[in-house]
Image (cartoon, rainbow, N blue to C red):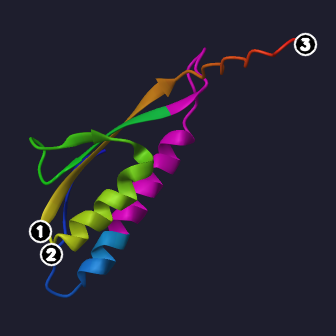
Amino acid sequence: MKKTFKLTHPKIRVDRLAEGVKRDVKKYVKRERKKKLPEGVDFWDFDCKFGPNEEEAKEIHLAEMNKYIDNAEAQQLESFYVEILAKPGHRTKKPKPEEDTL
């Protein structure tokens, strides 16, 4: 998903537009996670960018998306750019803690 969302509309309030954007992002992520995983892949990971426009977008984590949308609403931006791209992810094992022998 690469899309510029507008937070201005003559009849719809800004807070409702922001909630709609959050819903669209959640729906897209859910749809992508339902896709069949390729061989040797553990889960779907996502590369995300957010910014006032495509050129100024910076990389963020998917979990921070709602915070950035709320921030754009608070700053009264007219529009903002969201990019979410699915990629294969591989789980890594946590290192085992060393045990003290007495």
Q: Position of residue 69 (x, y in %)?
A: 30, 62
Q: Which residue is mark 1?
A: 78
Q: Is residue 88 above or below residue 19?
A: above
Magenta highlight range: 20-44
Assess disc 1: are there few (<14), some (14-19) or many (≥20) residues with their C-alpha within 10 Å of its C-alpha.
some
Instruction: State the SS at label 1.
Output: loop
Q: Amino acid at mark 1?
A: Glu
Q: Residue at x 15, y 75 (%)?
A: 8
As drawn, the label of residue 102 is 3
Task: Please tell me whether residue 32 belongs to the stretch shown in magenta.
Answer: yes
Distance of label 2 from label 1 (alpha carbons): 6 Å
In the drawing, does residue 79 fall left or right of residue 28?
left
Classify residue 98 by image quadrant. Answer: top right
Q: Residue at x 19, y 88 (%)?
A: 11
Q: Are marks 3 and 2 in contact (CB under 8 Å)?
A: no
Q: Which residue is mark 2?
A: 8
Q: Residue at x 61, y 24 (%)?
A: 42
Instruction: State the SS at label 2.
Output: loop
Q: Are marks 3 and 1 in contact (CB under 8 Å)?
A: no
* Front one among 29 and 50: 50
Distance of label 3 from label 2 (alpha carbons): 67 Å
Q: Is residue 98 above or below residue 4?
A: above
Q: Position of residue 65 (x, y in %)?
A: 36, 53
Q: Are marks 2 and 1 in contact (CB under 8 Å)?
A: yes
In the drawing, does residue 60 fall left or right of residue 27?
left
Q: Is residue 31 above or below residue 44?
A: below
Dot 3 or dot 1: first in sequence order is 1
Q: Position of residue 34 (x, y in %)?
A: 57, 41
